[in-house]
Amino acid sequence: MEVIIDFDNINDNSKRDWLIRSLKLMGIAYKTKGKTQIESSQTIEEYNKDLEAGDAEIDKGNFIVADELKKEMKKW
């Protein structure tokens, strides 16, 4: 899914900066067009590679389900 945010039409600099920091903090990749030049935290290709790596780990059985995680957390 692709969401389009027109950074150039956000007139309040503090709101634009907050949005950019939030996207970076959450690891959400983005790209820009227009006059605002912002570096993306992750390209679509990098994102897809991360997804493929995660799928490979699941296929190998390297995961824990929520119930098992809750039991493990109680031991901490």
Image (cartoon, rainbow, N blue to C red):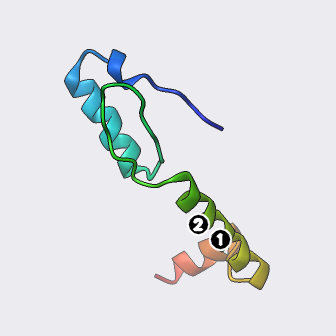
Q: How dense is the environment of label 1, judged by Cα within 10 Å: few (below 14), some, or many (20 and up)? A: some
Q: Is 26 drawn above or below residue 74 in the view shown? A: above
- Look at the image and tell me in which quarter the N terminus lies: top right
Name the residue nearer the viewer: 1 or 26.
1
Q: Residue at x 34, y 46 (%)?
A: 39
Residue tagged 1: 54
Tell me residue 14's x, y (percent).
21, 26
Please report contact status of discs 2 and 1: CB closer than 8 Å, yes or no.
yes
Q: Amino acid at mark 2?
A: Asp
Q: Is residue 45 left or right of residue 59?
A: left
Tell me residue 9's x, y (percent).
35, 15
Q: Residue at x 36, y 50 (%)?
A: 25
Rendering quarter of residue 18: top left
Q: How dense is the environment of label 2, judged by Cα within 10 Å: few (below 14), some, or many (20 and up)? A: few
**Residue 42's mark?**
none
**Residue 50's mark?**
2
